[in-house]
Image (spheres, grey):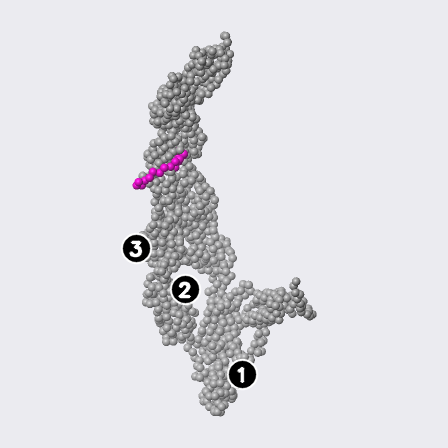
Amino acid sequence: MADPRRVERPLAFPQDPIPPSHLLARIHPSIIDFPTQRYYAVSAFILLQALKAYSAWKDAHYFEHDPSYNTAWMWCYADIFYMTMLWYIRIPWLQFTKFKTIFILLVLFSLNFLMFVIPVTAVSIALFKNTFGDLFTRRIGASRAKKVNVNGIINDPSHILGRHTLHILPHGSAELNPFNEFYCLPARSKGKKEIFIPISMNNTIPYSLTMEHFDFDTKLNTTKGLSRNDLKRTIELNSKDDGAEIYYVRIKAPGLYTLKDVKSRNNIDVRTKHKAVYVFTCPTAEFESSATTDLCTGDDGPVGIKVSGVPPFSLGYIQRVGDWEFPSKISQIRPQDVNVLPAEKIHDMDNVDPEFFRPNPTQFYSWAATHHQTVYLKPTLEHPTLYEYQLLNVTDGFGNTVFLDQSSVINFRVHEHPSAKFACNDVDPPKLLVNEDVAHIPFELQGSGPWKVGYRHIQESNDKTTEFNVSLSVPMASLQVRSPGIYELLEVSDSYCKGNILTPSTCRVVQPPLPSIEIRETPIPSECSGTDFIGMKFFTELKGTPPFNLKYNVYKKTGRSKTIVGSWNETIDRSRYIISYMPTTSGDYIYEFESLSDKNYRDQDISKYAFSHTVYPQPDASFDESLTTLKTIRTCVGESISLDVKLTGARPLTLFWSISGQLYSEEIQDDKYRLKIPNLEKPGPHVVSLVMIKDANGCSIDLEARDVVIDVRRERPTAGFYTNNQFNGSVEITQGSTATLPLRLAGKGPWMVGYKNTEKENAETNMVVTEDPNATLETKEPGTYEVVSVQDEFCRGNVIPSPYTVRWIDKPVMTIDDETAILKQEDAYEKPGVCQGASASVGIKFQGHGSFYCSYDKYQVGSWKLNPVHLGTEEINSVYPNAQVNLDTNTSGKFRYLFNKIADQRYSDPFVTFHRQTVEYTVHPLPTVAFSGRTKKQHSLCVGDSLLSNDMPPIWLDLTGQAPFVVEIRVKHQTANHLQTHHLSVPTHKYKLELFDVLETSGLYNIELVSVVDNNGCHSTTPASNPVLTVEAMEVATISSSDTCADHCVGDDLDYTLYGVSPFAVSYQFNGRNKKITASSSTLSILADSPGNLTIISVGDKRNKCTTYINHMTSIIHQTPSSFISGGREVFENIHEGDTAQAVIDLVGTPPFEFKWQRSELVWNKDKNHHYKGNVLETHLVQDVQDNRYYINTAVEGIIEVTYIKDRYCQYPRL
């Protein structure tokens, strides 16, 4: 029993209830306590509002911008997200009801629209700047010796007022085929079907236009005028291109189209770009009409495809063989007499060189005319089925693809060769009976009826032959013949093909004789008395074809009447038969023989045989049971045979036997004996009968043993290859495939056939056993095969000399065209170097049975890696023996193409060639030129200085490529048409540039690197994105520093350097009034806040109270000049393109004046339906103006504003 233990429990104290708001919180305080949650939430709200205020402050500086509804809604969405998350998390003290949440959101939305839509923020910022901004921008003023507002003095906007806006109504322009595309029209719909070609119209509405058409086929030029009604208008090209629209013109004929002239609706000529559009004849493909749609296996079935259009073509089709489908594609269908077609020079149809669309009046564009090519497919017809070819699509050299409809199909039925053979056999040959006119020889036909059969009849008596031809419509038929003899099939053909004669090809027709009988009676003596008889024996000898049927009746004579005792119908299967009858009662008996039948004839009358006698019973011999169970023993002419006989009786025994009517006797000592039958030289059935036996006691017994029938065949078995009545047969196969050699066997199967390859030394004889008289042998080895032996079921036979040759088809071979590459060593070619991006190709030649397939590997060699770098594998499909391989020149380096696999129509499985061809070529990199990285890209010089000035640091060029180089350099002024081009010979890869150009005009000069040509002849144009070197030519300054020049301007800082211990006391006189200021550092800066004279009187050091009086240190402060365009107003003026406008600038100050004015882009806002100022387009500096008014005559659109003015002494704004 367990010891009881005391359990101590803590005392329970009452706990405070948990507030409901804490229970609703999504985040448990054990994860993040509630104060921290509130801190994060409030911080996020403050951050959100701070970002909102910053965005509003930034937008407030752009007063020209419209109210930003999008920005206001963006911040509204941010507030919605914040309040939704706050409502979902349910932080205590920040849990608001849905109503309160919606109310807070409405307040925030109102603030958002006040800040971003209503310009309250901008007004507030302006008030803040005016009220508190001066606290941070105050300096000591010269006129008061107190701090004054610097911005109010320096940045006084009243010095530059007004602007002149000029809006140009531009001339239009027109561009044909703006997207650089190729078009085509169907050949059969010429003049009927139309396509639409785009014309880009910029800033104009066309009224009429003239187009020129050059026909590719007829070479004729025609011009046609079109009105606006002939055009179809679409949407604008781009919202940024004001006035750019697309019109479409209807085209109904192929050719080259150019836009000659366009007139707007104001009858003003519109500028047209010198550009053309190619409208080709759409590619077509169709099958050549075939003379027959029925072919035979093994025939060549070329399929011709006629392709027309602009080469090179590619063709997609499907080959269907029965239920199998094989998609295929043929490419590089091109004329063989042209090396490179224009379409083959275009590597990317989506990025065609614009020069290709520039019309050339000296060209006849023969390559663009419709070309006709015929491609032949040569399928191997191996299977008796339906072959079908369907064309899917055809593409011309410029990417125009036509998808062909379901009617682009050709099909033909491939039939098996018919065959014929007799269905008769030597055991039961067809029979022509006596008194019958015809006999029927059964034979079998294979193929498609009706059939034509040729055969001949050979008379056995004199070997006379007669040939016949018959037509049959059913496959199971029979020949009707009227004469016995041997019939042999010669040839057979059906509705489509010539056929083969199979074995058995001969049949023997026999005429059996009428059955006959010889009857001899013999009484049966009683064993007890030699004078009484116990019955009668009738010895019958039958001639005919067993089995025989013998009908006879037995009567008993009573007085003068007779009573029938019985009728018998004996079936006899032998030529000799004994009928024994032993009545049960005595009396006179009459035996009447009624009729005799055999296998061929029925009920022949034999009533002449009738016998009577008065009725008032031995050694034995028989054939072995194994012989009697056989109906017939078969052998061939000249063959020997033996028969086993069983005997009983007192020996020695004398056996009498006969064959074919010839009687023989044998003296036998044993109970078994083998009869040796003499060689049988006559064909046909031979009956061997046991006639009589005599024992040692002289007792002779006539035997009733069953006969043995020996069937002797005339023909021995034969064997040979089927060669279609030729001396020998032959077949060609691809290496590795199996050849089928047809046999023809005669005789009784199964056959054992021996054959060998006679072209092999010590070739062994191969044996094969078959039961098919039309068997085949299979082999993969080439050579000449002969049958050397044959044996059927009964005897050895004869061999028909019929050698059969198996040969390998030559494999396809590929070689490099030596006219396109140079042979360096065996199977290795080299092509001269080309420049990067240039067009290059190499020709290849095929030998074999097209179409051809070839694959090659691309390698980059000569790199820093030890092994060549494999770049990929590509394939070639060509129906022609000549093809072109375009070389990749997009990347510089040394490349090698290794042609390794090849296939053709016969060897369809690609294999590695024994002699693998290689082509190497070098792609020279395009040279480059750039400013050296250590060359400073921006410089400042004075007008009149040379670029070789000492103030100009050296300019270094870095070049790549093969030295020496020729570099084209352009020095261009940005705001003028001044342009200077230099062609420099540079011998090294690093070169110090020396230019002798003098900067004659103020402004910015760009030194641009235009192009470079290296020693390899490769030319490269410097990309527009390359940095340029900028040199700013500045006017000669006329303003001296405060230390050397006495003239100053309002807003200048009069800087002084104080030496000694600060603070300093400085006394000065301004316009005759004495002023005193204190400087706490060694530098003193006094703001010239008003025009007048400032003279430094003295400066004192408060530490040693030393005062120095200054003589002749006077500064003259001049008023800031002002400019007013159009009287200080904003003028908006519209003019037509070609007209000019005048902007008047009033200048206030002391001549001569110098000022800058700029022209800004005038941008049309379609959404707001008004103009606004865009980017600065140009800036001009005008100097040495002596008058107080200046005129700007301009014909360029934009907003003209003065940005800088300077008189003899001062300028605004200050630099």
* 791 or 821: nearer the viewer: 791
Nearest to N terminus: mark 3 or mark 2: 3
> Of marks 1 and 3, which one's residue comes earlier in the chain?
1
- Residue 420 point in image, percent of width and height: 41, 32
Query: Farthest residue in the top direction?
Result: 560
Q: Which residue is mark 1?
A: 147
Q: Residues within 10 Å of mark 1 (few under 14, many from 20)?
A: some
Where residue 1208 sits, quadrant-wise, is bottom left
On the image, the x and y values in percent for residue 493 come to: 40, 33
Q: Which residue is mark 2?
A: 1023
Q: Secondary structure at mark 1?
A: strand
Residue 987 sits inside the magenta stretch = no
Residue matched to label 3:
824
Q: Is residue 1173 above or below residue 856?
A: below
Q: Quadrant of residue 507?
A: top left
Image position, residue 452 (x, y; %) = 41, 31
Q: Is 767 a magenta residue? A: yes
Q: Is residue 757 above or below residue 96?
A: above
Q: Outermost residue toward the front? A: 1
Q: Amino acid at mark 2?
A: Pro
Of the residues shown, which amino acid type is indicated by label 3?
A: Lys
Could you tell whether 600 is left or right of 829 in the image? right
Is residue 828 visible to us here? yes
Look at the image and tell me whether residue 49 can be seen.
no
Distance from label 1 to label 3 (Cα)? 91 Å
Residues 318 and 219: in front is 318
Disc 1 marks a residue whose amino acid type is: Lys
> What kind of secondary structure does the magenta stretch mostly adopt?
loop
**Which sits in the foreground, 211 or 1101?**
1101
Inter-mark Cα distance, 2 to 1:
55 Å
Q: Which mark is residue 135?
A: none
Q: Position of residue 1066 (x, y in %)?
A: 49, 88
